[in-house]
Structures are given as structure tokens and as C-alpha cells.
Image: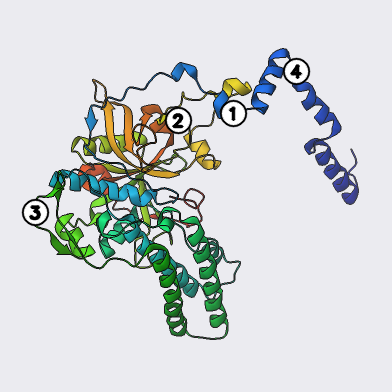
Amino acid sequence: MKKLPLILGATLFCGALHAQEALTQDVLKELSGSFENTVADKALKNAVSGNAIKKLVVNQENANTPDTYFSVSVNSKGITDQQNSGRCWMFTGLNVLRSKMISKYNLDEMQFSHVYLFFYDQLEKSNLFLQGVIDTRDRGMDDKTVEWLFRNPLSDGGQFTGVSDLIGKYGVVPKEAMAETYHSNNTTEIASLMKRKLREFGLQLRDMAAQGKSKEDLEKEKVQQMKTIYRMLVLAYGEPVQSFTWAPKKNGKYTETPKTYTPQSFYKEVCGGEDLNKNYVMLMNDPSRPFNKVYEIEFDRHAYDGHNWLYLNLPIEDIKEMAIASLKDSIMLYFSCDVGKYLDSRGLLDLKNYDYGSLFNTTFGMDKKQRVQSFDSGSSHAMTLMAVDLDKDGKSTKWKVENSWGAEHGFAGHLIMTDEWFNEYMFRLVVNKKYCPKRILDLLKQEPTKLPAWDPMFSNEI
């Protein structure tokens, strides 16, 4: 066969592609004919078009009251409520500490001030952004890091290293020492204004750099900019308390003479002063990346002088082993997952709750690795792992977490998850290193693989 002239051949090739790829009239006719529109199809169309899909796919075979017994459970009192904020990471970290306090002092209840630590979280993140702008001042606006900075100047989300860095630097205070405000419970409005101001400040710093100003000049200007940020934070959240009095109470009465503390001395003297960065490790179950490897997320931290997010990626069974060991020792754990998947109104996370396949006569068959790779699943919420039910062989059958959505949600403020759901949608667990076998501790000695802050798995973390 003779070769076609180059231009003519290319034209015919492109035309063939369009004929195959586009939704032509023939293809549309074939698609339309595939819907048979039987009596059953008509009934389904009426049902689906007029109702929420989730309502139609409730699996009635799984509607019985779940078993709420757990063979291993850590004692807890009271449920916290993050309200309309993305602070689940902070509530979760402080709830782990709160459980220890309740046990240590035999308290009726105990809550920490989340707004106190959140004030400094927002202040530190603002400085992190502005200093990041200074550090990247010689790069173009189309540089990936610069673009990421301006897209994400501030957020109310976070993860465990934020908890550990903030507590280590600023301490903690009880809730009664600094009360929540409207804006700490409803962060969207003030955060939007602060992000706008930070972007404006960031551009000003870049303009100064373009004019030949030194790094020292830029950092002096940054301090002046931070005064505006500090003022906005004080107006929205209140000025952080510097000292307060506290003593444990039982049945409404002090069991010790009240003492005056600073937030730092309170954490050290009353809460035990544990070095969270030193003693804890974040474990991840992400089958889209090699297991038994340590990963570090560059520039993903809460403070400029803080720690980047670091984790060890492990098979799910290894993570379960350490979780069970911690719970048996009455120590709760920081836990995060894709909470929106298969959660029902009762507070049960079970793969059998909803039957989407039967409704649409198809299957949703991606495994965990494929869901992560295709951006279908990722960690969306942090909670406090507090209980596990074990069978006669010591294997987990279900789990329970203490949530931060208020006592009226779920099982009196808790969620229960089947072991099968845990396998598919659990992502991270933070565990004390004393519950890690030697082989796990040895893995932590390796040089971390660096991942960029804009990696899809972490770009919208909580």
C-alpha cells in the first residue's frame, strides 16, 4: 500500500479519532437504546429522580441495632463539640490528653480550651506563610511551591504534628480559663478575611524583593504585618490567657488547693509534660505507596520552627496490633479516616449500610489502593480511638471512636465501625512508641522519602 502524503494522512487520522472519540449521533443512539425503560426502570427513575439516593440505598438487612459491647475500652467522660470548624485534629489530640487527665485525677469531667491553642495555630500558620513567601522570593509566581503557598495561606485543618508542636511551645489551659468564641466555633468567615489579608501581605513582600530589598528588610516588614494578623486574631478569638488558677474537682468540690499556672507550667506539672514529638509516631495505611517506608511531607507543618509531617506506611494488620496494645493499656489513640463513606444516621460505619450497586445495577469495585490513586478516598476526619472488640482468637471485630461532633450525634457522641470498614477507610493512627515492636522502631531509622505539600493525599488534610 502506498504511503499517503504526510498532511493528508494526518488529517485522515485525526478525523478517524474524532469519529471514534466524540459522542456522535450513532453513539448517542446506541446509548439511548441501552436504557430499556421497562416497568421496573420507570419505577426506579421515578424513585431516583425524586429522592436522595442515600435514602433509597439503605440496606434494610443491616438495620438492626448494632452490638455496642466492646471487650477492650478506655474510660472517658463527656463529649466535645468542634461545631462549624475544621479543628477535629486538635480536638482529637487534646481528647487523648484529656482521657489521661480524667484517669490521673479521677475527675468528673475535663475539657481543654481549644480556642487557646487555636489562636496560636493560626498565628503560627500565618507566619509560616509569610516566611515561606520570603524564602521563595526569587522564584516566579508560576513556581509550584509559590503557587501552593498562595493557594493555601491558612487553614483550620491540621494533623498530629500540629498538636505536638503547639503544645510543646505554648502549653495547654483548661476550658474554663479561656472560653470559646463565636468565631472559634464558626471559623469560615474570619479565616476567609485572614487569607485575603495574608495574600495581600505576601504580594507586598514579593514586590519589596523585586525592588531589591534585603531579606532582613522583608522580615522586618513581616513583623509589622503580623501585628495586623495578631489584632484580627484577638478580636475573633480573644487574647490568649497568660496565667490561671486550677485544681482537680470531684462532685463539684476541689480535691486539692487551687494553684496558679502558666499554660506551659500547667502542661508540665499537671498534664505530665510528655514530649509528644519524641514519644509518638504516626502510622499510615496507604496501599498506593510502598509499605515499611517513612515519608515526610515538605513544608506541611503548623509552625515555621515546627516539624514536618512524618509517618511510617504500614500494612493494616501491623497498625491494628499496636492499636490493640495501646487500648489494652487504657491509652486512647489519635485516629483519622474517610468518615463520610458508609456512615449512617445511627453512627455506624459499615460497608453493608448502603447498597448502591443494586439500585444502579452495577458494582463499585475499586479497592483501597485504587480509590486513593483515583482521588476517590482519603483521610477527611480525625477522632479518638477508644475501644476494640476482640474474638476468642484475639482478632478485632469492631472498633469505637470518641467523636467531636457533640453528644447528640451517633452513639451518644461516639461512632462504631466494623473491622471490614476499618480495613478500607482507616488511614492514620498515632501511637506511643512503647507499643511498637522493635522491627517497627528499626524502620523509623531510615531516611524519609520526601513528598511535596501539594501531594493529592495531603492537600486537603484535617
Horizontal and vertical percent position of residue 233: 41, 67
- First reached walking from the N terminus: tag 4 or tag 2: 4
Circle 1 SS class? helix
Q: Is residue 156 above or below residue 214?
A: above
- Give the vertical position of 199 relative to 18 (above or below): below
Amino acid at the residue labelled 4: Glu
Secondary-structure class at tag 4: loop
Give the residue number, with chain letter if any, for mark 2.
345
Q: What residue is pinned by disc 3?
A: 256
Q: Nearer the viewer, mark 3 or mark 1?
A: 3
Q: Which mark is residue 53?
A: 1
- Using the rendered image of the protein, determine whether residue 66 is visible from the camera's viewpoint: yes
Q: Disc 4, disc 2: CB below 8 Å?
A: no
Residue on which disc 4 sits: 36
Give amino acid for label 3.
Glu
Tags 2 and 3 in contact by the CB under 8 Å rule? no
Q: Amino acid at mark 1?
A: Ile
- Left or right of residue 27: residue 311: left
The image quadrant where one finds the N terminus is: top right
Q: CA distance from mark 4 to mark 3?
A: 76 Å
